[in-house]
Every structure is written in structure tokens, then in C-alpha cells.
Image (cartoon, grey):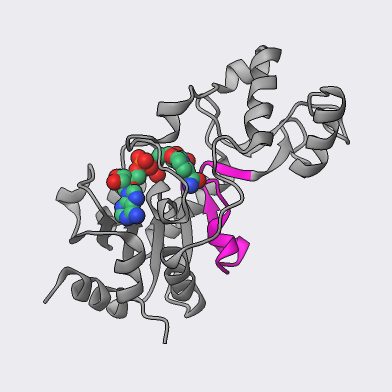
Amino acid sequence: MSDVERLSQMIQAARRIVVFTGAGISTESGIPDFRSPGGIWSRMQPIYFQEFLSDVEKRREAWERAFSGRAGWTGRSPNAGHFAVARLVGAGKASSVITQNVDNLHQDSGVPAEKVIELHGNASYAACLACGLRHELAELKVRFEAGGELPSCQQCGGVVKTATISFGQPMPEGPMARAQEETLACDLFLVLGSSLVVYPAASFPPMAKHRGARLAIVNREPTEQDAIADLVVHGEIGPVMSAAVPAN
Ligand code: NAD
């Protein structure tokens, strides 16, 4: 039996799947992952949360990057891997998708927003750091480009930032708690496209395993947690998941 057939069997046998995704699921949509050659951090330095708060020039640079789309994680379309995940959720097989991605492509592929747990936020909109009010990038961009105005909250005047979690920024409490709940309740934890080196996100697969769930990993290269997985499929996520979860 091939690894993809094994994966398909594991999925069929599962009653409650949690899908956990990293940058690798979006490379087939044209969004580079972080660590591969040509990845985002080989092209630009990350701006740390403290720098964004304390240094106006860094904040301006962060907004220039966001408005120019230079990081490249907005404006793309979901691929076959995202659609296979959406089928698992649509069929009631997967209860949620925990993602490290900020590209909104799970929602764009048809997974209801309330079933997507975003550990590192979302780059497709902005939010006030003080009161949390959502702001749309297109509106902020007009004022930034017209008068160089750094975005501030329309409601309370607080500092506005893209809704991503930056390096040095605390992990979001609500999503972390929900991710833990979901992880502890699943019987199959399916990792798609994560090198599993970024913590605390990478602590969820061992947590699921420890609780008795099976662990399957699909990635084109080895990950940090292959040794504890019940199944590792080395391949491209789109083709592998299309075969394991056929559309019919
Ligand atoms: P990573 O870059 O560490 O790992 C991605 C993994 O996916 C790598 O092991 C790579 O070999 C594999 N991969 C890439 N394309 C693949 C494909 N088509 N099929 C199978 N495997 C593939 O990414 P990570 O572990 O998710 O963590 C890095 C951080 O990057 C996260 O915090 C996330 O917030 C951020 N990030 C997000 C995006 C996005 O939103 N799309 C893009 C880049 C980085």
C-alpha cells in the first residue's frame, strides 16, 4: 500500500480530525514559505513588535511593506491543498483548521471563518492594538499614500497594526486556548506543510499524540517531528491531498 493510500485510510477511519497547516500549504498558491531559499526572510528582515511600537520609522516601513504587498501573502488564490482541507471540513470530518498562516486562504477556499484558528493572525486586515477594532487595509492605504498618515484607530486613537502576530508579540490567548481544546478532542491530527520548528505552535502535534490521537504529517522534506508520527508522507500537498480526499 502506498503512503497516500495509508493516509486516505487514516482519514476515512477518523471521527474527528484537526488539520494543522503551515506555510507549505500555500507555496502552491505562489506564496513562498519562510525557510526555503528565496523565502521571505531571505529577502527582508522581520520588524519586531517592540520596534513597531517604539520606532516611528520602523512602523512606517512595516506599513509600506503591507501596502505594497511586498511580503507577498495577500492577493493569492487557494490551491488544491486548501480545497481538499475544505472538503474535510465540509463533510464534517475535520472539526477545525489550526493555521500558522496569515494569508486567509483557508477562508477563501470555503472553510467557515469560525472553524479557522489563526495562531499568527491575518495579514488581510488591520486591527487597533488598544481596542481591537478592525480596520480595512484599502481605507488605511488611501490616507497613508495621500498624506503619509500612520494608521491610528478611528474609535480610540490607538496604534493600528496589520492583524498578524509579529516576532516578539504575545501569542493570541483566545486562538491558543481553542487550538488546545481542539487538539485534545481529535482522534487524527493532520499536519500539512510545516517544518514544526516554530513554538508554541509546534507543541500541538505532540500534545495530540500524547492524548492518544494518531499523527500524520505531509511535507516535502523531513520535519522535526517525523519520529513521533504514525505516518509521514513526503510529497507535494496539493497532489497528495487531492488523492487522499478526492473531490467526486
Ligand atoms: P516553514 O517555512 O518553516 O515550513 C514550511 C514547510 O513546508 C517546509 O518544511 C517545506 O519543506 C514544506 N513545503 C513547502 N511547500 C510545500 C508543498 N507544496 N508541499 C509539501 N511541503 C511543502 O513554515 P511554518 O512551519 O509554517 O512556519 C513559519 C512561519 O511562517 C509561520 O509562523 C507562519 O506564520 C509564517 N508564514 C506564513 C505564510 C503564509 O501565510 N502563507 C507564508 C510564509 C510564512
- Name the quadrant where ligand 1 sits: top left
Q: Is residue 139 above or below residue 181?
A: above
Q: Is residue 229 above or below residue 101?
A: below
Whether the magenta-drawn stretch holds residue 201 is answered as no
| Residue drawn at 19 percent across, 50 percent down | 226
Image quadrant in which you'd find residue 209 = bottom left
Q: Is residue 212 above or below residue 149?
A: below
Answer left or right for 27 relative to 59.
left
| Residue drawn at 47 percent across, 80 percent down | 91
Answer left or right for 115 relative to 79.
right
For this orientation, the residue located farthest to the bottom is 248
The magenta stretch is 100-123
Inspect this view and state whether residue 201 appears.
no
Q: Residue 247's x, y, as percent? A: 42, 81
Quadrant containing the N terminus is bottom left
Quadrant containing the C terminus is bottom left
| Residue drawn at 58 percent across, 53 percent down | 104
Q: Residue 158's x, y, as percent? A: 80, 27
Viewer-nearest residue: 173 or 107: 107
Q: Residue 131's x, y, as percent? A: 78, 35
Number of dots carrying numbers? 0
Image quadrant in which you'd find residue 57 = top right
Image quadrant in which you'd find residue 148 = top right
For this orientation, the residue located farthest to the left is 1
| Residue drawn at 24 percent across, 71 percent down | 7
Inspect this view and state whether residue 67 appears.
yes
Q: Residue 163's x, y, as percent? A: 65, 39
Answer left or right for 174 relative to 231.
right
